[in-house]
Each structure stands twice: as C-alpha cells, then as structure tokens.
Amino acid sequence: MTAAPPPIAQLRVEEFAQRQAEPNLQLVDVREPEELELAQLDGFLNLPLSQYGEWSSEIRSRLDPDAETIVMCHHGMRSMQMCQWLASQGFTNVKNLAGGIAAYSQIVDPSVPQY
C-alpha cells in the first residue's frame, strides 16, 4: 500500500498579502487568459490548467521545485489540483491560496474586480 500524499497547505489571503512582495516566492495563476483580463495580481506566472499539455513538460525549467510556490485560481479549486500535481512532480513547498482571487478581492483589496 502506498502512503497518501501529504495534505496541501492552505495559505490565507491575509497572510499572502503580507508576504506577496517577498522576492523568493514563486507565484502561479492557473486561470484562463480571459479571466486574467478581468482581474489579476502582479507577479504571477500564468499557467492555465486548460493548456496543461503545452507547459507541463517544461515545469522544472520554468519553476524551482524547492522554492515556496503559491498557486492561485478564481476560488481555490483549480489551484488545489495544480498544487497536488506539483507535489506529485517533486515540488516540496507548495501552497494553495485559499479562496483564490475572489477571496483576495473581498478581504484584502476591493479594487481587484470580482467576476
């Protein structure tokens, strides 16, 4: 029997807001390009889940598997899928932005549009 993967850490948007300027963070947004046109946060690399086939083979050349990696989507579901996949690829410090950009807009920065 194989051991279950460790649970993915959840990062609250309030904590992320305090840490998002840290230079060593890798920020990944898995939303679609049309979602980015509606609302986005600076510093995120866009890797849309729907385009997985286009970027998945390059993931280790685009991201450092040992760096703290925070993944965001609209509400936190797609980003959780990405976190689980990254962990399965050997990424050691992956966190899901709980509630996604919607929670960030509601709790941290109301100037970020809701959609």
Image (cartoon, grey):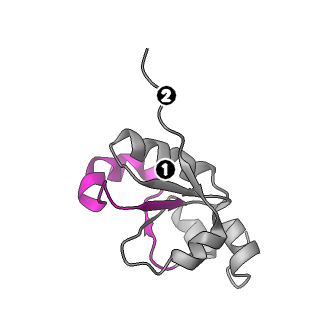
Residue range in magenta is 42-71
Kindly identify which residue carries mark 2: 4
Secondary structure at numbered mark 1: helix
| Measured Cα–Cα span from mark 1 to mark 2 | 26 Å
Front-lying residue, 4 or 105:
4
Q: Nearer the viewer, residue 5 or 88?
A: 5
Q: Is residue 8 left or right of residue 115?
A: left
Relative vertical location of residue 75 with respect to residue 57 in this rendering, above or below: below
Q: Residue at x 67, y 80 (%)?
A: 112
Q: Identify the residue at horizontal 51%, vertical 56% (top origin).
A: 95
> What kind of residue is marked 1?
Ser
22 in the magenta segment: no
Residue 35 or residue 110, whichever sits in front: 110
Q: Are marks 1 and 2 in contact (CB under 8 Å)?
A: no
Residue located at (48% from left, 48% from top): 82
Residue 85 quadrant: top left
Residue 58: percent from left, percent from top: 26, 53
Specify the amino acid type for callout 2.
Ala
Please identify the residue farthest to the bottom as the structure is shown.
111
For mark 1, what is the residue? Answer: 50
Horizontal and vertical percent position of residue 78: 57, 50
Identify the residue at image location x=34%, y=61%. Answer: 67
